[in-house]
Amino acid sequence: MLLKDRVAIVTGGAKGMGRAIAQRFAGEGAKVTVADIDVPAAEETVRAIRRTGGEALAFECDVTDGRQIREMVAATVAAFGKLDILVNNAGAVVGAHGRPTNLTALSEDAWDRVIALNLKGVFLCSKEAVPYMKANGYGKIINMSSLGAINPPSPHPHYHAAKAGVLGLTYDMAAELAKDNIYVNAIMPGPFRTPFFGEIVEDKTSEEAEAFFASVGSNAPLGRMGRPEEMAGPALFLASEMSSYVTGIVLPVTGGLPLPVQR
Ligand SMILES: NC(=O)c1ccc[n+]([C@@H]2O[C@H](COP(=O)([O-])OP(=O)(O)OC[C@H]3O[C@@H](n4cnc5c(N)ncnc54)[C@H](O)[C@@H]3O)[C@@H](O)[C@H]2O)c1
């Protein structure tokens, strides 16, 4: 039980990698708040955790809304007594995934929405969580960036700028909060097969969707996309005492990217 008696919040924990992380953390003994805008899916994550004997709470929370975040963090502490771990996982290319959006096509509105979700959300959730972690004398913050922050596969300047911003925020918070025994690290996922790609495959047949996922996976040296549960181990490493001398790092979980695959 690597997270026995720990209390965790996983934003975007209703689906994809967030769900896998929430389930794994609960399996390791943590009490978990699943904070998401998709309430039915968050409740499904919580049911799955409870079925295996874990403790969890679903909470409707848009990570771009400071008031909702305040309520979600306070509800977590009220339910579970403290806060040890925050996984800033919620993220998306809002509304334009699969339609490369270069600088000329990118609207100011799309820029604002994507920065708000993928960068400001990390700031707002961390700002709300840190006072509880300071009171607790301990904290672990894990921020989901993207390989696209340093190696963009297609033009989404707003999303990639936000994910690069997450790296800067991670380094800054790690330096500031180390004295408070609060660890701050980032994960840089490569291609993971999750509902993140829903907009891209929604109009495709199942054969076309499989061909799309196979082609995305073939870019990685390991030759396939990651499965959501393959993010749970790296997140557990950063959330547990296995990383007790690790702060301010960026952990790539990318199937070998960006190594060249043509040999
Ligand atoms: N899947 C990939 O290939 C990939 C690659 C690099 C980075 N990432 C990043 O990893 C993280 C997890 O991605 P995933 O693939 O599991 O995505 P996903 O789409 O499967 O899950 C994201 C979750 O975030 C929730 N969410 C969206 N907007 C929200 C908001 N405003 N407030 C709260 N919750 C919100 C969604 O409802 C969903 O449950 C994201 O930050 C994503 O940008 C994903």
Image: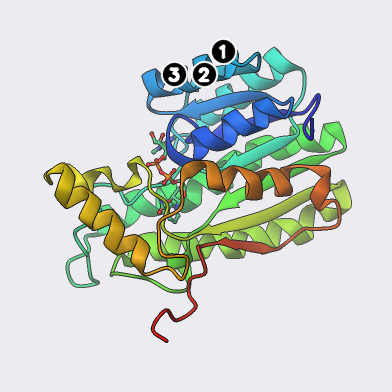
- In the picture of the structure, the residue carrying the numbered disc 3 is 44
CA distance for labels 3 and 2: 6 Å
Residue at (20, 47) in percent of width and height: 201
What amino acid type should be assigned to the residue bearing mark 3? Glu
Q: Please provide percent x and percent y for residue 79.
A: 68, 13
| 180 displayed left or right of 258 | right
Q: Is residue 22 above or below residue 125?
A: above
Q: Please provide percent x and percent y for residue 198.
A: 26, 43
Disc nearest the viewer among 3 and 2: 2
**SS assignment at label 2:** helix
CA distance for labels 1 and 3: 10 Å
Q: Is residue 46 visible?
A: yes
Residue at (84, 39) in percent of width and height: 138
What amino acid type should be assigned to the residue bearing mark 1? Arg
Q: Nearer the viewer, residue 48 or 173?
A: 48
How many numbered discs? 3
Label 1 with label 2: CB-CB less than 8 Å:
yes
- In the picture of the structure, the residue carrying the numbered disc 1 is 51
Disc nearest the viewer among 1 and 3: 1
